[in-house]
């Protein structure tokens, strides 16, 4: 599928390899793919000269190999980021940081089709989605935070007559971000844009399953004119590179998105190293509550998108749908019909709605959850099996006759699997909605505005959607209650995550 025009240097240079490669993408476009670690504005081999393969999940075939970082490369990247912060970036004013972030956004707009195709190749998401949602949303995130760069300031605090007190919002210095594979370009933007806007430098780690677009954006950062060492990107494995970042003594902040277990290990590593600031955006098991007075067709469409978008690989996926019993039968028939009509397959085909799961491992994990659901007594209404011969596709899957004790109602499945159940009263559904350790998002469908507001206030979730699902904007905060995380990304709230407050107290005449 992928035709390599230029590959590694000849055998003669056995110990080194080209850090740039041209590949023909399945949609016919040619892309310059970067495969080295990005440190000090250069693509370099890892110290150990190791590489690993990245796979196209639609076919299971290898796309290319990229450099595999270790703790030694983390040290080099941190040194580059620290020097860049101390020597240059800390003296660059907000206006210039904003200009650079906007320039990066311009370059991403210029290369939008190429970036979208590369995202689809490495991640498997439909090209249409990458082009229409992921890219514009990542670009708008860089632009949004570009606007904040020269608007970050402290306060004057009145205390006593003979004193002048003010605060400053200062950067942490060297920050790091570790992101997952479900929205590689968007997650990079959510973390890199505010980190840089607030005046920090960054050591960035993409997921080992989707390193290609992060490296491409690194090249665009250089082209945009970011000084060397401000942005560093290390491809590699979580337990090696991620763990080295989490316990590094010279990294002052880590922002992480991913699984609950790894999130907790990062907090522990912070406690055991230098108490670096940690923000976490973890998983969810979000309830979607549909009342009898809602617009049924709209509720079906939103609920459908709420779970099946991005093959169900969404931290805020509406994986527990609660329907008021008087409309349950009608809802389930329409919902099922919708799910059966999903176009699943080649992500580069223009009509495809659902691509593959990210990896064989995730595919197996989801299938094992489906088996557990059946064993624990839930009714498998549709799906529950592989689609096609190659790649990691799973048919849209609906379970009914579920209860809150079941594993499929407690654990994040991260696939196209939804459980639908009935409720009679508001009290009952709120109680059930809260019966998980998560609190990332929730949704309510009703035409009764009073009920919508009351239940939104009641729900323990970082985001509540009313008569919609999955709507996120660069200027609206996002994050979790309970075990879904710590801190908020996006919006003005994100500035709190990437700055620390300094208080300056000046004596205007107080005598000792
Ligand atoms: P993961 O949490 O292992 O991976 C996310 C990122 O963390 C990757 O960059 C990975 O390299 C890194 N990482 C892994 N181990 C690490 C360690 N010990 N120290 C530091 N960094 C480490 O998630 P994975 O294995 O890809 O997916 C497993 C499950 O996690 C999914 O089924 C889903 O339930 C959940 N998940 C949630 C996401 C979200 O958006 N909240 C995103 C991805 C996964
Ligand atoms: Mg891949």
Image (tube, rainbow, N blue to C red):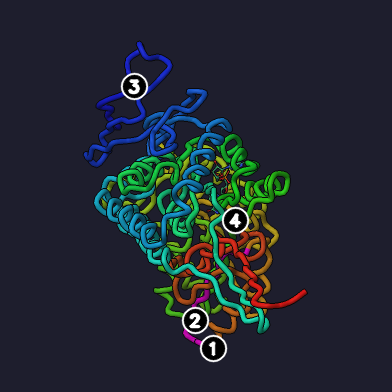
Please state the horizontal and vertical placement of residue 342, each as a whole percent of the image: 37, 56
Separation of residues labelled 3 and 4 (CA atoms) = 38 Å
Q: Earlier in the sequence, mark 2 or mark 3?
A: 3
- For disc 4, the marked residue is 280
Q: Is residue 447 magenta?
A: yes
Q: Nearer the viewer, mark 2 or mark 3?
A: 3
Please name whichever residue, 103 or 324, is drawn nearer the observer in this view of the structure: 103
Q: In screen coordinates, is 184 left or right of 450?
A: left
Q: Quadrant of the C terminus?
A: bottom right
In this view, the residue farthest toward the left is 28
Q: In screen coordinates, is 375 left or right of 119?
A: right
Is there any visible trace of residue 465 in the rendered image?
yes
- For disc 3, the marked residue is 8
196 versus 229 height, above or below: below
Please state the horizontal and vertical placement of residue 485, each as a whole percent of the image: 62, 59
Separation of residues labelled 1 and 3 (CA atoms) = 64 Å
Please name whichever residue, 368 or 28, is drawn nearer the observer in this view of the structure: 28
- For disc 1, the marked residue is 450
- For disc 2, the marked residue is 446
């Amino acid at each position: 599928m992928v035709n390599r025009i230029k590959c590694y240097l000849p055998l003669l240079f056995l110990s080194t390899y080209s850090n740039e490669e041209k590949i023909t993408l399945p949609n016919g476009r040619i892309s310059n793919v970067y495969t080295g670690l990005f440190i000090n504005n250069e693509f370099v081999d890892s110290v150990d000269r190791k590489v690993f393969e990245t796979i196209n999940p639609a076919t299971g075939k290898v796309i290319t190999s990229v450099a595999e970082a270790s703790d030694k490369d983390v040290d080099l990247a941190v040194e580059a980021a620290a020097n860049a912060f101390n020597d240059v970036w800390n003296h660059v004013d907000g206006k210039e940081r904003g200009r650079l972030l906007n320039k990066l956004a311009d370059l991403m707009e210029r290369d939008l089709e190429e970036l979208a195709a590369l995202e689809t190749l490495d991640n498997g998401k439909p090209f249409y989605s990458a082009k229409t949602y992921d890219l514009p949303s990542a670009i708008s995130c860089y632009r949004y935070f570009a606007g904040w760069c020269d608007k970050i300031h402290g306060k004057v605090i009145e205390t006593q007559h003979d004193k002048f007190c003010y605060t400053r919002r200062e950067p942490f210095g060297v920050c790091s971000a570790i992101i997952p594979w479900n929205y590689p370009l968007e997650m990079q933007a959510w973390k890199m844009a505010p980190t840089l806007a607030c005046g920090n430098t960054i050591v960035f780690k993409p997921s080992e399953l989707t390193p290609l677009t992060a490296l491409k954006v690194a090249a665009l950062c250089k082209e945009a004119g970011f000084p060397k060492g401000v942005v560093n990107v290390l491809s590699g494995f979580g337990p090696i590179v991620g763990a080295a970042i989490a316990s590094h003594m010279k990294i002052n902040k880590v922002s992480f998105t991913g699984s609950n277990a790894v999130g907790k290990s990062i907090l522990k590593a912070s406690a055991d190293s230098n108490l670096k600031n940690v923000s976490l955006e973890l998983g969810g098991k979000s309830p979607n509550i549909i009342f009898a007075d809602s617009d049924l067709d709209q509720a079906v469409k939103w609920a459908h998108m709420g779970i099946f978008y991005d093959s169900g690989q969404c931290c805020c996926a509406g994986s527990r749908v609660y329907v008021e019993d008087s409309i349950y039968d009608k809802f389930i028939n329409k919902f099922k019909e919708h799910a059966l009509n999903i176009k699943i397959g080649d992500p580069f085909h223009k009509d495809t709605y659902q691509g593959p799961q990210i990896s064989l491992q995730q595919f197996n994990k989801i299938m094992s959850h489906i088996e557990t659901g059946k064993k624990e007594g839930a009714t498998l209404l549709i799906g529950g099996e592989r689609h096609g011969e190659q790649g990691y596709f799973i048919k849209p899957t609906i379970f009914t006759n579920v209860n809150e004790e079941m594993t499929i109602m407690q654990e994040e499945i991260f696939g196209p699997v939804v459980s639908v159940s009935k409720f009679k009263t508001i009290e009952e559904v709120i109680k059930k909605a809260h019966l998980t350790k998560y609190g990332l998002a929730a949704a309510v469908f009703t035409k009764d505005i009073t009920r919508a507001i009351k239940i939104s206030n009641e729900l323990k979730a970082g985001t509540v959607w009313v008569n919609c699902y999955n709507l996120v904007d660069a200027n609206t905060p996002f994050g979790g209650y309970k075990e879904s995380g710590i801190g908020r990304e996006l919006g003005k709230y994100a500035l709190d995550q990437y700055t620390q407050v300094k208080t300056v107290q000046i004596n205007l005449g107080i005598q000792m």
